[in-house]
Amino acid sequence: MNQQPHKRPGDARPSANPVLIVGASGSIGRLAVDEALREGFETRALVRDRNQSSLFPEGTRVVVGDFTQPDSLTEALEGVTGVVFTHGTYGGADEAERVNYGAVRNVLNALKKPARIALMTTIGVTKPTPGHDWKRRGERLVRASGLPYTIVRPGWFDYNEPDQHRLVMMQGDARWASDPSDGVIARRQIAEVLIGSLSSDAAEHKTLELVAEKGGAQSDLTPLFAALKTDPVQSFDAVLDRDNLPIAGEPARVVSDLDAVRGRF
């Protein structure tokens, strides 16, 4: 596939603004670190073990912290202008709450100043399952925070055919097969879209499902972002999402978390 970074004529170009990659040691996190460095960001990789420094290219600032422990995130978040979430787990409900949801809650609570958020969840996130529900609750925290954001729901990783790299951004989360027929996408392209959203005005306050179809990768993400509908103001859910996880039925701790973060920035 085309491994060159997407160019976005008309968008503000990134400077040395510090960006933190959460889940940096994962398969998409490492690619997000690479992409952020290529795009000129001062790039920080959040890891739990300093020995993981060897995973990242020269120029990466490796910061030690644990997203399940908010008190450990102070150094990682100091002065950041962007946070990219690439973390995730396929564990049971408890693990999904601790990781898929807890990382978002803890980072948002530890932020001292506003930052641009790029959150990766999954295609089919509105299909009720324990893992999906906790990812969706993490999305809701981001929307409630008042921060600028883009939420990316990628299809199945690296199931692409050799000629399948034309990016398609959808909304409404209508694909619930829970197999590659929902759509496929290369890991590298997920990283490119996440990092590209940080400096794109057209991507702000938008939630999208991301897949690839036959054809070459686009060189400009702006038209794709611009064609999307913006999430409703003060809504916990994305535009066009089905209303099947009512707040009134949510656990008290989740409602408390929403109340705590809502409008904080």
Image (tube, grey):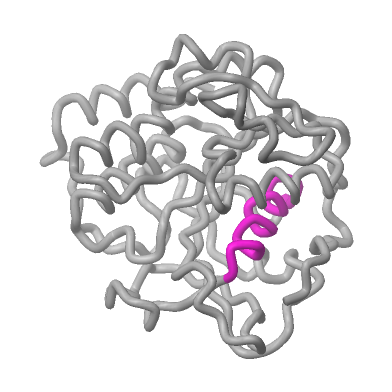
Q: Main secondary structure of the magenta part?
A: helix
Q: Please tell me which residue is depicted at 11% across the width and 41% down the height of the picture.
A: 249
User: What is the x, y in percent for residue 263?
Assistant: 46, 25
Residue at 86%, 31% in the rendered image: 16
Q: In the picture provided, is 206 more to the left or to the right than 176?
A: right
Q: Who is closer to the viewer here, 187 or 220?
A: 187
Measured as percent of width and height from the top left, residue 219 is found at: 81, 72
User: Which of these two is toward me, 3 or 128?
Assistant: 3
Give whichever of 245, 86 is nearer the camera: 86
What is the tally of numbered marks visible in this picture? 0
The residue range painted magenta reads 186-201
- Residue 173 shown left or right of residue 186 in the figure: left
Rendered view: 19 above or below 128: above
Give me the residue at 39% from left, 35% from top. Answer: 141
Residue at 74% x, 64% y is 222
**Quadrant of the image containing the N terminus:** bottom right
> In the rendered structure, does residue 198 fall within the stretch colored magenta?
yes
Q: Position of residue 25 (x, y in %)?
A: 57, 40
**Left or right: 242 as drawn, with respect to 37:** left
Q: Is residue 93 magenta?
A: no
